[in-house]
Amino acid sequence: MDFTVETATDAVVDSFRQTKDRRLREVMESLTRHLHAFVRDIEPTMEEWEAAIGFLTAVGQTCDHTRQEFILLSDVLGVSMLVETMNGTMNGTETGTESTVLGPFHMTESPRRELGDSIDLLGTGRPCVVSGQVLAADGTPLPGAELDVWQCNEDGFYDVQQPDVQPPGNGRGLFRTDVEGRFWFRTVVPSHYPIPTDGPVGRLLDATGRHPYRPAHIHFIASADSHRPVTTHAFVDDSPYIDSDAVFAVKQGLITDFTESYDEQGAERFGVTVPFTHARFDIVLAPEPETT
Amino acid sequence: MDFTVETATDAVVDSFRQTKDRRLREVMESLTRHLHAFVRDIEPTMEEWEAAIGFLTAVGQTCDHTRQEFILLSDVLGVSMLVETMNGTMNGTETGTESTVLGPFHMTESPRRELGDSIDLLGTGRPCVVSGQVLAADGTPLPGAELDVWQCNEDGFYDVQQPDVQPPGNGRGLFRTDVEGRFWFRTVVPSHYPIPTDGPVGRLLDATGRHPYRPAHIHFIASADSHRPVTTHAFVDDSPYIDSDAVFAVKQGLITDFTESYDEQGAERFGVTVPFTHARFDIVLAPEPETT
């Protein structure tokens, strides 16, 4: 039988019938159906199909060891957040702190640091203290919880983007909570920043009238025994673009007050001088699913 | 409002509202809806999402000036044929010879040749004559029609794949029909062949239990004034894989008899000796659409 617009999808789905891995077969069948539905919907010209091939090729060829343009494409199409959100919701983490995207900058291991250390290795920025508690869903503090933290600097750049300006590990730290599940460290308030605009994804945003900015945020991965780890952000409450994150990652529950503090006692405890910026960000971890 | 599984698609579609190019907006909206529907359907784990990013990146990075792995991916998913078929049907070429995929080997200009010339520059293969007529839909012969022909050799390789064995332009020719719309040239019977299997698309076929073979065929692009050009193949009727082309390009109407001939007169006319293989392939061109 000829391959026609009507028989095309069944023919391709059928070609995957001998796939041994059941999950792979399910994915390829679903991909075929949705991809063909998209093509039938937009009825591309041959020139548009060629342009799509060229775009995807350019996205792949923009990737290197410090850049992942396909993650960026997944991010700006909301796919990364959709996958992240489905994995969170489906596994019951609605009882814990909400997750958000990992992003493309968790590429080096964060250096181990002591509570109270500064992750701002240059020390030229306005001091900011981040403190909080890692808790179980029932409010029990989680001592010895692991906290991986990374952020950009006041100019909106991560260490790996500015190897000539920032020492490796700047803006990064691996902390462990104290006996009361508490953590605190010193840093600078991160800036909002544009995702890379000099590649095909940047050109797509430009062609569709979208800005490339992400609101200011600090990344966290929190984990503790017998609990589900969470990958999330603390968003700076008054940051530009808080309502229009280019990668759709903002959740209201993750917007955090970064307040000006004149508290002398607190300043002494945290090893800073007044005035300093103080952000409090508690993290609640859901229990591990029973089935695993 | 938070980005949730329920609101995700509308949020991303809405982000494209300021796209100036109306067609681009339509495409991005449709892409978002179908891509999100696929993701909601398969509910990928984070590891599966990472594997998909890795696969697409590898496809892009396998492309170079002699290889287009994204076209290959489009081919094995039936997308190339679907787009080709839609463009054919929608534009009324059902009155002409059916089209099929261009494929990735139309990368060099075919050398101009005279009717009767051989495109087998090595001359070591079994002689084959291809002849036919280019006609309008009403049967009127089309003199001076242009015919771009390319094919692989008896071992299943195109000239560009074997630069050390085949001279450039081997298996290729640009012909013009005579006053009666006729064409004829000498060649060898092409072999079936596997699409490149050493890249990510080859690994996908392997993982899904699919063979990588295309049945033997000769490529044609035929064009004439006031007619729609057609990109098509003449498939060798008794070729292996004629019922399971890895890229879904076979149409029954394009399967052509390649018959053993002992016709002494014909042999003399075509400049070969008996026995020779003879294939007759007529091409009907639909009229150009009125609107253009």
Image: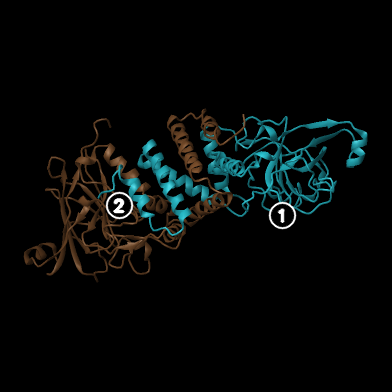
Chain colours: A brown, B cyan
Q: Which residue is mark 2?
A: A249
Question: In the image, B131: left or right of A186?
Answer: right
Name the element at disc 1. loop
Q: Check disc 2 and give the amino acid type.
A: Ala
Residue A186: image tag: none
Residue B43: quarter of image: top left
- x, y (%) of residue B59? 52, 47
**Would you place residue A11 above or below residue B138 in this image?**
above
- Chain of the residue where label 1 is placed in the rendered structure: B
**Would you place residue B114 above or below residue B209 in this image?**
below
Name the element at disc 2. loop
Most extreme residue toward the left, as rendered? A265
Most extreme residue toward the front, as rendered? B290
Q: Residue at x 30, y 45 (%)?
A: B7
- For the residues labelled 2 and 1, the Cα–Cα distance comes to 49 Å
Q: Residue at x 32, y 52 (%)?
A: A248
Question: In the image, A73: left or right of B248?
Answer: left
Q: Are marks 2 and 1 in contact (CB under 8 Å)?
A: no
How packed mark 2 is, by other alpha carbons closer than 10 Å (few <14, some 14-19, many 20 or more), is many
- x, y (%) of residue B23? 48, 53
- Chain of the residue where label 2 is placed in the rendered structure: A
Residue B109: image tag: 1
Q: Check disc 1 and give the amino acid type.
A: Glu
Nearer to us in this view, B91 or A40 = B91
How packed mark 1 is, by other alpha carbons closer than 10 Å (few <14, some 14-19, many 20 or more), is few
- x, y (%) of residue A74? 40, 49
Residue A88: quarter of image: top left
**Would you place residue B167 above or below residue B128 in this image?**
below
- x, y (%) of residue A23? 42, 32
